Amino acid sequence: QVQLEESGGGLVQAGGSLRLSCAASGRTFSRYGMGWFRQAPGKEREFVAAITWGSSSKYYADSVKGRFTISRDNAKNAVYLQMNSLKPEDTAVYYCAARREYGFSFSVVGYDYWGQGTQVTVSS
């Protein structure tokens, strides 16, 4: 069982940066693939970024590639999402997710545990 808690969201102007953090409980955190998703009002939850358990591979949605960076620190049971050059269309609730199976997934159903989310609002 893994419990996830996001933090670091807030209000930022377009072009600004935010760093989201996800704190995880559980002794086997390092064995989980981790992902970030987001959900804007009236839209489905969408994939943002993912990282495999050993940080050997990272994946990004095309919409954030080159602007967002996912990382993890297994010693601290944490995963991060550095968001630069933010745009108003990045406004959403951002969710941290963990998957037990090896590898990664672009799909919501590929993850077993979810945080409660943190709001990111980018003003124009």
Image (cartoon, grey):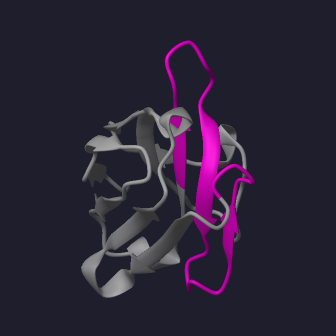
The residue at the point 39 percent across, 67 percent down is: 80
Q: Which of 94 and 124 is in front in this view?
A: 124
The residue at the point 70 percent across, 53 percent down is: 61
Image quarter hosting the N terminus: bottom left
Question: From which residue to which does the magenta span run?
Answer: 36-64
Q: In the shown orientation, is residue 96 left or right of residue 106?
A: left
The vertical placement of 80 against 111, above or below, is: below
The vertical placement of 71 against 37, above or below, is: below
Percent of width and height locating residue 2: 36, 56
The residue at the point 51 percent across, 69 percent down is: 70
Q: Which of 9 and 21 is in front in this view?
A: 9
Q: In the shown orientation, is residue 115 left or right of residue 45?
A: left
Percent of width and height locating residue 32: 52, 69
Is-magenta flag for residue 60? Answer: yes
Is-magenta flag for residue 67? Answer: no
Image quarter hosting the C terminus: top left
The vertical placement of 27 against 63, above or below, is: below
Looking at the image, how many numbered discs can be counted on the residues? Answer: 0
The residue at the point 55 percent across, 78 percent down is: 53
Which image quadrant is residue 115 in?
Answer: top left
Q: Nearer the viewer, residue 77 or 6?
A: 6
Percent of width and height locating residue 99: 57, 58
Q: In the shown orientation, is residue 17 left or right of residue 76?
A: right
